[in-house]
């Protein structure tokens, strides 16, 4: 339940400047293409048939998302946790996705919306080899909208500032945290959590 109705929103937020609306483009342009070519990281959001939403981090070498044209992006899939939430959403839901691209050192971000399909073309995947192997699949995204988002959120968070970087040892390793969260539910024989050092070695072997 909310105490704010759609009708009351404009009492809280002023009407945006016309340029804020006009900046949303139906295809990629020179600026968005360059930004994507500089980006080693994005967040990919999708929704399932029941309306639930999944947001997944994706990363690779600089420019890891390929620009097939002003209307299509190709996102290679690398080894992960095998939950395949995004792919199940794409195959069973509307196929609509949105990506937010980040470039280290730049506070502005780029938002790209589109309709995705899963591709397994061997020739396409062969062009996307990274970390010594091709992707397991490629998400081909037909772009429907692209626009730059102002840098205020990253400025407020000081995301790229060295002085706010947290030492990794303030938290347990992800293996230790997940082990604590699930040990009452799953008890495989000989199962034990991995230290942060062990995790990093394992990750490097399976990028």
Image: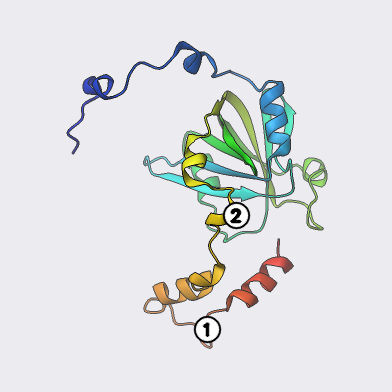
- Residue count near mark 1 (Cα–Cα under 10 Å), binned few <14, some 14–19, many ≥20: few
The image shows residue 66, relative to residue 33, as above or below, that is: below
Which residue does the image show at 66% across and 70% down from the upper left?
A: 200
Instruction: Identify the mark at residue 162; answer none if there is no mark.
Output: 2
Judging by the rendered image, the residue that carries numbered circle 1 is 191
* Closer to viewer: mark 2 or mark 1: 2
Circle 2/circle 1 CB separation < 8 Å: no
Tell me which corner region of the image, top left, top right, bottom left or bottom right, holds residue 5.
top left
Image x and y of residue 195, in percent? 58, 78
Q: In the visual, does 177 lie left or right of 1?
A: right
Q: Give the SS element for disc 1.
A: loop
Quarter of the image with the C terminus in it:
bottom right
Which residue does the image show at 82% across and 58% down from the upper left?
A: 132
Which residue does the image show at 66% across and 27% down from the upper left?
A: 32
Image x and y of residue 203, in percent? 67, 67
Instruction: Identify the mark at residue 20; answer none if there is no mark.
Output: none
The image shows residue 95, relative to residue 87, as above or below, that is: above
Residue that extends furthest to the top in the rendered view of this protein: 18
The residue nearer to you, when weighing 56 against 167, is 167
């Amino acid at each position: 339940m909310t105490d704010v109705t759609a009708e009351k929103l404009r009492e809280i937020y002023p009407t945006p400047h016309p340029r804020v609306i006009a900046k949303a483009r139906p295809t990629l342009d020179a600026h968005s293409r360059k930004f994507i070519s500089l980006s080693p990281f994005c967040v990919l959001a999708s929704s399932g048939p029941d309306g639930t939403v999944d947001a997944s981090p994706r990363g690779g070498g600089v420019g890891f998302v390929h620009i097939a044209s002003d209307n299509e992006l190709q996102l290679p899939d690398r080894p992960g946790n095998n939950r395949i939430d995004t792919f199940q959403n794409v195959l069973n839901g509307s196929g609509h996705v949105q990506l937010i691209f980040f470039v280290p050192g730049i506070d502005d971000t780029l938002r790209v919306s589109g309709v995705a399909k899963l591709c397994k073309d061997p020739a396409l995947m062969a062009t996307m080899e990274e970390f010594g192997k091709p992707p397991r699949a490629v998400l081909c995204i037909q772009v429907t909208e692209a626009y730059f988002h102002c840098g205020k959120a990253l400025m407020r968070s000081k995301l790229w500032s060295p002085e706010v970087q947290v030492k990794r040892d303030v938290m347990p390793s992800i293996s230790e945290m997940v082990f604590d969260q699930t040990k009452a539910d799953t008890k495989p024989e000989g199962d034990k959590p991995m230290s942060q050092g062990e995790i990093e070695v394992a990750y490097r072997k399976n990028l």
